[in-house]
Amino acid sequence: MTLENKVVNQVWDQVVNQVWEQVLNQVMTQVEDQVDNQVMNQVLGQVWDQVENQIKNQISNDLRK
């Protein structure tokens, strides 16, 4: 293998690795964002259900008085 070929191969490997790393990082970031959103939605949903139940209970208690 000539020196030129070695250099070309090294540069190519570096480029491929960098691009691959960027793609992986983007995918991971998107996945993390989606998971974060899902978790947040679940948590907010649960909190909202609890608040809603408390309000309903409070209203029905007030109506019974």
Image (cartoon, helix red, strand yellow):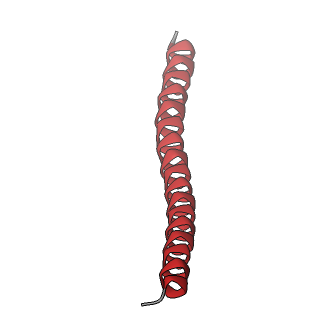
* In this view, 3 is above or below 65: below
Where's the N terminus, which quadrant? bottom left
* In this view, 1 is above or below 20: below
Residue drawn at point x = 50 percent, y = 30 percent:
47
Q: Position of residue 51 (x, y in %)?
A: 53, 26
Residue drawn at point x = 53 percent, y = 78 percent:
7
Q: Position of residue 8 (x, y in %)?
A: 55, 82
* Of 7 and 52, the residue lying toward us: 7
Q: Position of residue 63 (x, y in %)?
A: 56, 17
> Residue at the left extreme?
1
Residue drawn at point x = 50 percent, y = 22 percent:
54
* Of 5 and 11, the residue lying toward us: 5
Q: Position of residue 24 (x, y in %)?
A: 49, 63
* Of 53 and 2, the residue lying toward us: 2
Residue drawn at point x = 55 percent, y = 65 percent:
18
* In this view, 3 is above or below 29: below
> Residue at the top extreme?
65
